[in-house]
Amino acid sequence: MAEGKKNTEKVVAVNGNMITIEFSDRVMQNEVAFAKVGGSNDVKLKSEVIRVRGNRADLQVFESTNGLKVGDEVEFTGELLSVELGPGLLTQVYDGLQNPLPLLAEKSGFFLQRGVYLRALDRETKWAFTPIAKVGDKVRPGDRIGSVPEGVVTHYIMVPFAWKGEWTLESVAPAGEYTVDEIMAVAVSDQGEKRNITMTQQWPVKIPISDYAEKLLPEKTLVTQQRTIDTFFPVAVGGTFCTPGPFGAGKTVLQHAISRYAEADVVIIAACGERAGEVVEILREFPELEDPRTGQPLINRSIIICNTSSMPVAAREASVYTAVTLAEYYRQMGLNTLLLADSTSRWAQALREMSGRLEEIPGEEAFPAYLESLIAGFYERAGLVRLRTGEIGSVTIGGAVSPAGGNFEEPVTQATLKVVGAFLGLSRERSDARRYPAIHPLDSWSKYKSVVDAKEVEFARGILRQGAEVNQMMKVIGEEGTSLADFIVYLKSEFLDYVYLQQNTFDNIDGASSAERQRYMFDRIYKVLTGSFSLPDKDTARSYFLNLRQMFMDLNYLAMDSREFKEQEAAIEAKIAERSTVNA
């Protein structure tokens, strides 16, 4: 990046939130520039170069371009679109450009003003620094100089990722309290160049942070404590998954449950282009959620990137990349980070709008032809890595997709399915039937390892499949036209659905089912699914399975180590023995 570069050019065209400039000096792809409304310095709009052709460059403006006209000045910074990294990121609510929204609201009032950009990190807070490296140490980008406590995590101060080669530490600050801008160390290169290391650094959002030893294959299950996910459609630590679903299918509640109970150290929510009402729900409820790991508010280990549908469209693209860059930063500390992007459909719509303004040849449904590669590039930034210290860190990415009308055949869903490792398809039919989480047990799939034996899970899915077929048949020919054996299969599938797939996320016990409890309960349920029962007619069979279902559902609300759990379990065993033909 060119230091201190400030060349100024003129606007030659304005097309919505895209402007075109003619330049005489050097311009880079993804370079940040500021367009001066009316040529004054009062309102400067942040923008990014998205295409360079000959001596013309097209820039997307992250704000409304009202008042911007041909002849206005555009000042280039010589820097790529970047985020600020350092202690103080956790608990923050940012917009897509990493402006802290609470501070922005304090400055601007209810209606955010154009051209107001604030520093991402607090300059006044003092952090308790503990040195790790010492004078004379040879360091490389990403190596640790020291640490500060940031809430529940240890935040490492690292050699800036943008540096190249090996450096020797000339000085390291002693233990004490410092602000983020104070010098923590001074390093010298082999060529004699001196540079200061502070607690903060900049990193371009569209370039992955890759200062690690190697990338590993995700194998360990990320326990979310949601039975349907962990048992049937598991997610891996460092893996990728998507949750497509129509409006009202319970994406937000599922997102809350995953972020609260998943085995992750840091949770990042990217509310990208969602309706303002849904984002308000996240902003109001998220800080109130109790973190079961610490007993503190969940926001203490979370970051929210908020870019609603009423905000400028161009900033949606930036918000997704900002979120994943922050996730990669915490991965470099050996932490497991979980990024939930809601929703990538709105991001894709922003790409479609910019592609239209660039007059590119459209792909399917007018999305850009390169949509698949952009979506793949985003999900590829997830991963499990081994750092040079030997520690393991991860970024797990879950993207919510909002296909119009719940149509999973549309381009964004299909492009996402090609690159993710698990597909948790939310169903309108199950949502309407109040079967939550509304993950469709037959349409969904996962390539990752379950917390339960794979053969048993496959058998259970077979019961669900057969039960769905019998149910469809009964809708045509009625219950009386179905054989007793088929009817029992249907009852077993409904039993599995109610007692295992469905989960009350608002109950403290049923809302979070540990891997140990899932294995224990699935073992009990598997015995029912594989069991033979003496049931002479359909009425007896229906009554028996309804009673058994209710007894298991009551068990779900009892703590495993309680006396009531043991008593309920004994009652269930007696109920199964009543009709079981195994010991008869």
Image (spheres, rainbow, N blue to C red):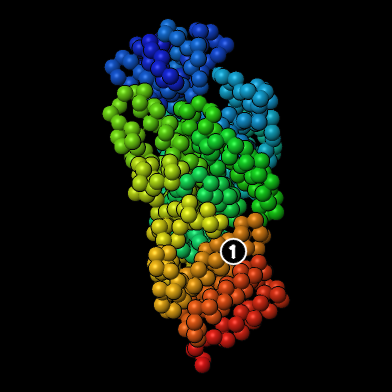
Outermost residue to the bottom = 584
Q: Name the residue under label 1.
A: 513
Residue 469 image position (x, y, % from top left): 39, 66
Report the side of 102 relative to 429 (left or right). Answer: right
Report the side of 66 relative to 152 (left or right). Answer: left
Q: Quadrant of residue 181?
A: top right
Above or below residue 557? Residue 59 is: above
Q: Which residue is drawn at 60% across and 44% down?
A: 302
Above or below residue 36? Residue 414 is: below
Residue 167 image position (x, y, % from top left): 47, 37
Give the number of callouts: 1
Disc 1 packing (10 Å; few <14; some 14–19; many ≥20): many
Q: Which amino acid does label 1 sit on?
A: Ser
Residue 522 image position (x, y, % from top left): 52, 72
Q: Residue at x 55, y 14 (%)?
A: 43
Q: Residue at x 66, y 44 (%)?
A: 285
Question: Is residue 236 visible to the viewer in this orientation of the structure?
Answer: no
Question: Is residue 528 visible to the viewer in this orientation of the structure?
Answer: yes
Query: 209 or 179, which lies in front?
Result: 209
Residue 384 image position (x, y, % from top left): 45, 52
Query: 521 or 247, which lies in front?
Result: 247
Report the side of 240 relative to 145 (left or right). Answer: left
Query: 198 or 534, which lies in front?
Result: 534
**Looking at the rendering, in which quadrant would you find the N terminus?**
top left
Q: What element does badge 1 sit on? A: loop
Query: 313 or 335, which lies in front?
Result: 313
Q: Which residue is drawn at 53% across and 8% down?
A: 40
